[in-house]
Amino acid sequence: MEPVTIALVCIAGALALMLLGIPVVYCLGCTGAVMAFLIYGPVSLDKAGWTTFTTLYNINWVPLPLFVLMGCIISQTSMGQDIYRAARNWLSRLPGGLVVATIFGEAAMASAVGSSTACALAVGKMAEPEFERYGYSKPFAMGALTCGGVLGPLIPPSIGFITYGVLAQVSIGQLFIAGIVPGIILAFMLAGVAVIMCWRNPVLGPPAGAVSWAERLSSLKKVWPLVAVMLSIIGTIYLGIASAAEAAGVGCVVVIILAFFVYRLRWADFYRAIVEAATLNGMILFMMVGAWFYSYVLGTSGAAKSLMELVYGTGLPPLGIVFLINIILLILGCFIDAITIMLLTIPLFVPIVVGLGFDPVWFGVLYVVNMQIGLITPPMGLDLFTVRSAFNLPAGHLLRGVLPFLVVLIIFLLLLVFFPQLSLWLPGTMGMGR
């Protein structure tokens, strides 16, 4: 069977099963197993067992369960509330100050929780009553909250970077550091749009009023636990003290200590966090096993090489090919969830990008931003509909609020494409290459 035919049958089979509502892990695993058996015969069954073992017995996956556990523990504390309250106290006098506080609150939470959905919900629960209290336009404010969730996987730690790093065999530590500068830039871009829109139309978000300096300084006292978490993870990776896996362990210990001794976490809440983390990790890792075998079939079929030859034959310049890949990913994001897209396309697209001479770390940042844009675009739009359901807002209203910030995200993606150093400068100054 021709390589291109194998790839097309694998992808078409997996997508067909997904459309039938079958869980992703079975779609990828079953498609890969059937195609491997047809191509390689019974020996493929032995390979399936070894794939499961080598996938899970991989130290590169270690940060994933630890960061998930860390996020679940943090969600049981008041850290998100403290961060939002501090941001609100310092930014309330700006037009749309509460929206700006929400965006920067999400940026701060992103340094402790690697999920866009978790970021949006953690900050949104505190922000929504404030929006109603000061008469903010709910669609506008919630649209900003939804798009601000993109900061979750962009600023480390990030589940998206871990997944990309393992599948693309790229340093997770460098990916983490590469997301910091783009994350800060995006936070200011989203906040700037909010301020301009509210300045031109105060009905969207009037200033919340002055806050005394005593209250501002007092709110900063409750932000230090987040700083401790950030230093234990990002600081140790950047300075070369720890790898991503080691930093995850350090960060997890720091969070547990803070949860019990600063936030007075109860044992019942701690148990709930562990159960939630175990459930999420089991689901993710089980999915990775199916995806890894699926990727093995695509890789050994020579489909990636055939696709590269096809792409090179188009005559497009290297940057044009990167644009084409991003357009494909944006379209896929409208219909398929982010992790499925990563599992399906990373084995195909990364070899092409590396073959064109581009840095895989830079492409990883593009990839994660692209995937997060997909989470706020219909009809799938997981973050979009999570926010809609959590805060009881009609989908049409939320879409109108999301639109101006979605334009900013597209412009931001273009900036990352044209200026790779925004992503690559900070990793280049790291104290190590782990």
Image: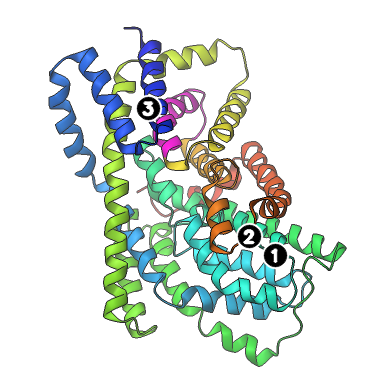
Do the numbered discs 1 and 2 sit on residues whose CB atoms are within 8 Å?
yes
- Circle nearer the viewer, 1 or 2: 2
- Left or right, 177 with respect to 255, comes to right
Horizontal and vertical percent position of residue 160: 44, 47
Report which residue position mark 3 lands on.
14
Pick the residue in front: 136 or 153: 136
Classify mark 2: residues with Cα within 10 Å, few (<14), some (14-19) or many (20+).
some
Tell me the element at label 3. Answer: helix
**Pointer 1 or 2: first along the chain:** 1
Tell me the element at label 1. Answer: helix
Tell me the element at label 2. Answer: loop
- Left or right, 82 with respect to 415, comes to left
Compared with 356, 176 (above or below) is: below
Residue 358 falls inside the magenta stretch = yes
Report which residue position mark 1 lands on.
138
Report which residue position mark 2 lands on.
393
What residue occupies the far top of the structure in this picture?
Answer: 1
